[in-house]
Image (cartoon, rainbow, N blue to C red):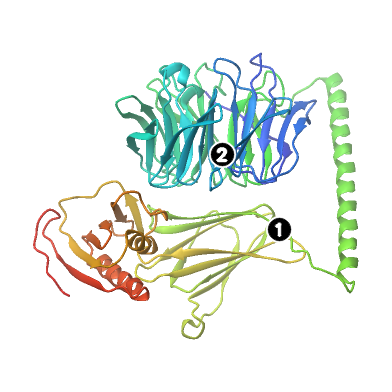
Amino acid sequence: MELNLNHVDYLQVGVTSQKIMKLLPTVGRKATQKVAVADHDGVVTCFGMKKGEAVPVFKSLPGQKISRLELGGALGTPQEKIFVCSGSEVRGYTKKGKQFLTFEANLTESINAMHVSGADLFVCASYIYNHYCDCKDQDYYLSGDKINDVLCLPVETVGRIVPILACQDRVLRVLQGSNLLYDVEVSGPPTVLELHNRDGGKDGEEVLYGTADGKLGLVRITQSGAITSWELDNEKKKGGVLCVDTFDIVGDGVKDILVGRDDGTVEVYGLDSSNEPTLRFENVLSESVTSIQGGCVGKEMYDEVLTTTYTGWVSGLTTEPQQMVAGPGDEIKMSRETQGKVAALRAELEQLQLKVLQGREKYQQSSQSSTAVSAVPVFSINDKFTLCQDDASYSLTLEVQTAIDNLLLQSDVPIDLLDVDKNSAVVSFSECDSESNGNFLLATYRCQANTTRLELKVRSIEGQYGTLQAYVTPRLQPKTCQVRQYQIKPLSLHQRIHTIDQKRPMNTLRLMGQFSFAEIHSWVVFCLPEVPEKTPAGESVTFYFQNTFLGTQLEATYCKGDANFKSDNISTISILKDVLAKEATKRKINLNISYGKLTNILSSPIIDMK
């Protein structure tokens, strides 16, 4: 069935985070729904549409940045209470805007993920998971890597509390109380979790997940283990998945899967007779999609896909036709309505232009006075520096809330800039003298008008490490820029994997000395990407890696005073030896270094070279 959706903008709020917008439920299926959205200004906005205009229901006062918004309520009743988290605080609002809850979680870090189920509240900071019931502490769990999202299976269906954590180390962690029940390995770092069909399916056990490398999957979380139903590969190299929802936008009685990505792509997947997803609709926005919902907002009887973008635009892809064929009598009525809207927009535009002129004149006058203080404009940058497995390159994505004027890239380590089809900016290179000033790369990107998102690709050389700096200058007055730094690590092309081939012949490196577990872990973090900065719990840890360029593998096992590295690439072992020896020398730690070659990973003599 062909799906035609038309784009319409409703409202713009401040800069938004992931999963920051929800649609409030209604009594009738085809009645229009209210929209609740929160932003980095700390403002919660609830609005509805009336005669094509956004009419606010309530708007909270500004405050600390809001990182998540969820709906809740008593089990078995409409989930129409609005919960937001900012810092380590959780606040609750009724659908009319009355604040009924202020709960301080007393976490040392800000809450970045939240889920509400009846009287149960699940919150996560970077590595910490907490479960509260009626605002009383129940369970606690320390994750081995950063937590990106949290979800709980529907208690009314499964009959028990089953929290699920989406963690950066490519694992879904299923908990039971304060303990880990089991791990679910996925192919990429999971960024978002949602219940399939919004209720987990027939048994309440089906969970949709999206990954940072653009994959989408469905997994069943049972008491004994997980069963993967399907996983969609990112064959067209689209952006990472930021938000997922399920809604019957086609109207065939089967809920479709709505997906929003960080490159602005909005997708609608339908399920065929064998419950396999097929793409039915695709639309590309100019900025990343932070939230997505299916419902009825603009006009009764017309369903739509509602999205929120990074800069705060709340817009819809509606089934309502935007160009209607009308009779002679209707044509006059339609043209009058259109003329009224155009006149109102022109009047608003003139007022805005007048305010801008007045503001510029005021700034010029104040800047010329003897007591003038220059006010630097503040702007937000959403940046991401990730390793792409397919072409062994790093993708640098920069997104600014206003138009980008130019971007300067500077690197003190040799790197290559690769062509990106989506990038329309004009690049120019400057000559570098690496011996005198340490610069290996100086490149300037001049952006076209209204460019708010820029995507670059760079490829590094393993063994050479340093810093890549990006100087972002927006089209703002007075001119100002922000600097972002990205570390190019010694083994920068390595990526975390779950297991390695145990039959490969391996080269080995062993370090022994008076170093602590935290010290050797910090050295490994310095050498390899995708290693959590926090020292793992326990006395020892093992990580597996694969070189995305050559396909070689690496095993790192270390504890206090002893570290073992095994790889089928001698260059990897050599780089590790050099870098780790330098780090130990900086801390004045004596190392006993031995290395050799194994015929297989299980048994073989080690050649000591001390």
Q: Earlier in the sequence, mark 2 or mark 1?
A: 2
Q: Which mark is residue 378?
A: 1
| Residue depicted at 33% across the width and 24% down the height | 223
Give the residue type that dot 2 points to. Ala
Question: Is residue 30 rendered to the left or right of residue 459?
Answer: right
The residue positioned 34% from the left and 24% from the top of the image is 222
Q: Is residue 215 above or below residue 417?
A: above
Q: Residues within 10 Å of mark 1 (few under 14, many from 20)?
A: few
Q: Which amino acid does label 1 sit on?
A: Val
Nearer to the camera, 394 or 609: 609
Q: Residue 338 carries which label?
A: none
From the viewer's side, name the closer residue of 162 and 590.
Answer: 590
Residue drawn at x 59%, y 15% as measured from the top left = 77
Q: Tell me where residue 182 sits by quadrant.
A: top left
Q: Dot 2, how many residues are within 10 Å of its Cα: few (below 14), some (14-19), or many (20+)?
A: some
Q: What is the secondary structure assignment of the residue under circle 2? A: loop
Q: Is residue 539 above or below residue 377?
A: above
330 is higher (above) or lower (below) than 177: above
| Residue 87 coordinates in the image, percent (x, y) | 60, 45
Q: CA separation, marks 2 and 1? A: 30 Å
Rendered position, 502 above or below 338: below
In x, y percent, where is residue 347? 90, 42
Which residue appears at 30% of the width and 69% of the height? 575
Find disc 2 in the rendering and name its residue. 105
561 relative position to 112: left or right? left
- Whether residue 140 is visible to the viewer of this picture, yes or no, is yes
Q: Position of residue 237 (x, y in %)?
A: 45, 47
Q: Can you give x and y, in whole percent of width and height, for residue 7 in the image?
A: 67, 35
